[in-house]
Amino acid sequence: MSSTVTQAAVPATSLKTGLEVRLAARNKTLQAHTSGLAPSYIQANLIVLPSRYADDFRLLCARNPVPCALIAESTTPGAFASLKSHVRHPDGDGTSELRLAEDIDLRHDFPRYCVYRDGKLAEQTADLEAVWTDDHVGFLVGCSYSFEQALAAAGLPPRQVVQGRNVAMYKTALPLCPAGVFRDCTYVVSMRPYRAADVERVRDLTRPFVSTHGEPVAWGWDGARRLGIEDITRNDWGDQSLRLDGEGPFDESEEGYVPVFWGCGVTPQSAVVDAGLSGTIMAHAPGYMTVLDVRDEDMFPVLRK
Amino acid sequence: MSSTVTQAAVPATSLKTGLEVRLAARNKTLQAHTSGLAPSYIQANLIVLPSRYADDFRLLCARNPVPCALIAESTTPGAFASLKSHVRHPDGDGTSELRLAEDIDLRHDFPRYCVYRDGKLAEQTADLEAVWTDDHVGFLVGCSYSFEQALAAAGLPPRQVVQGRNVAMYKTALPLCPAGVFRDCTYVVSMRPYRAADVERVRDLTRPFVSTHGEPVAWGWDGARRLGIEDITRNDWGDQSLRLDGEGPFDESEEGYVPVFWGCGVTPQSAVVDAGLSGTIMAHAPGYMTVLDVRDEDMFPVLRK
């Protein structure tokens, strides 16, 4: 599966908050991927399922929280503008929910969407107005873009952010723990190249982001092979990762650098295909996320200085 | 790794409650594995770590809840007789803990223990009295024996229960999501043979047991190979699985039956070896569990008739 990624013409980097990103997506001035936008704000993946699959999906997330960290869902089937948060308020008594976004429309607030019919990608669309029904339940899943600012602040900015590109994503051979109709599914991962000597620091920096994939699932060339990724230049979604100098694809010839892989919130839509689910299912286009009102330190207080 | 399993001489099947099993282990009249004991009571695995590994272990469990469902831990480092439960009371408001056992001693209430030193199995012991220190933190992890009564009640008793044997357990090639010092670790699974035609029913019956491994992670001969299990007759812990007629080992020649694999709470002690952790670490001997005061329907109300 390859994607055709086009950069939007709007100055997306001028969008500084989650709400600004959502409104720009909603009024269609933002059509770009969201890597690097609204730094430190939590970004989120989307999957929208017929209600008959909702329980199994919640179980899939509970059993596979690294790729599928469920952070919110529609308050009721059909609801696209009101969210039940699954994140506890870190400053509360452990019972109150952390509200994630006050003004959100799941049908519009991602710059691009994928629509699946009977387990196959049918089309990409700018919004879900025409396909969303009263029976659809929207789910938000944590996104690794949420920790990119923390990496940058530590002097380890992800290469694709510096280069203004979408992250490279791969379908792996690593099985998900099955859950009801979700069987024969595997992880999707995102990849960022780092110096081998920096991997432990990168692990430490991303570890606190427990509901946005957290620390890597694998790293190094051996790690790539264990995931079943034979050719790092052949990503399944997003943009191909380039060499640091931008001259050609990143691969094993770039001395000192290794691939580092994180769980990826494209996993749910890949699972829909793996499991061959029937009906109309919607998702964000990989890399084209929505951005929430909460910042990384709101969700992960350990980050507070 | 092979185990030497001896059956105890005590009539273990006369033990009907968790407390009876714990007291029998404590006074050393019970030296047998606990598969089939105190039907419907929740059984638990043990890992006891130096406090410096406690945070990383909690994260390992959070990232890998299927093999490592953390249900309780020592209230403070060194505590062996008081537990903080991580299970919410299903009938409460979601904030109160479900108390798991009122009279428990983690050093004595398992029929047999393993002691690891610097990442290697050093000895098996009848209790932990001599090795437990004020710096050790005990963790209880859910156990698949907890759902064996539900399978039996549905007419699908696990074969090893009928045969009075320990379950067969296997080290797999399936990676755990890394967490701090826990890296390069893989799943351990338990295996029970079932008719291929019964697998979906077995999945359904065990699915509600979310904190005792839940539904299987893999099944069938292809599933075995995907886990890296090449020879089903070579288990790493527990007893070899036998044919239904008891004549020789279960293998692919037993027509109509396939292996069904669940996450296994031996995974933490296997992870300690994989990760090469230093110091003295203790665990239950695989298959030799403790049994709690709560029954399956106390923990999983969906089971109530």
Image (cartoon, coloured by chain):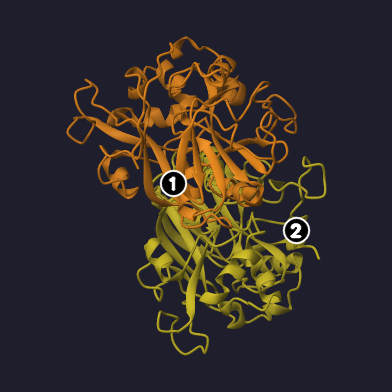
Chain colours: A orange, B yellow
| Residue A210, visible in the rendered structure | no
In the picture of the structure, the residue carrying the numbered disc 1 is: A187
The residue wearing badge 2 is: B302
Q: Quadrant of the C terminus of chain B?
A: bottom right
Left or right? Give the position of A299 relative to B274: right
- Secondary structure beneath disc 1? strand
Identify the disc placed on residue B266.
none
Q: Residues within 10 Å of mark 1 (few under 14, many from 20)?
A: many
Q: Quadrant of residue B289?
A: bottom right
Query: Residue flagged by tag 2: what amino acid is it?
Result: Val
Please state which of residues B133 and A54 is positioned toward the viewer in this rendering.
A54
Instruction: Depth check: give the residue in front, B238 or B243.
Output: B243
Secondary structure category for the residue under label 2: helix
Q: Is residue A119 above or below residue A97?
A: below
A247, above or below A274, in the image: above
Describe residue B249's horizontal placement relative to residue B109 as left or right.
left
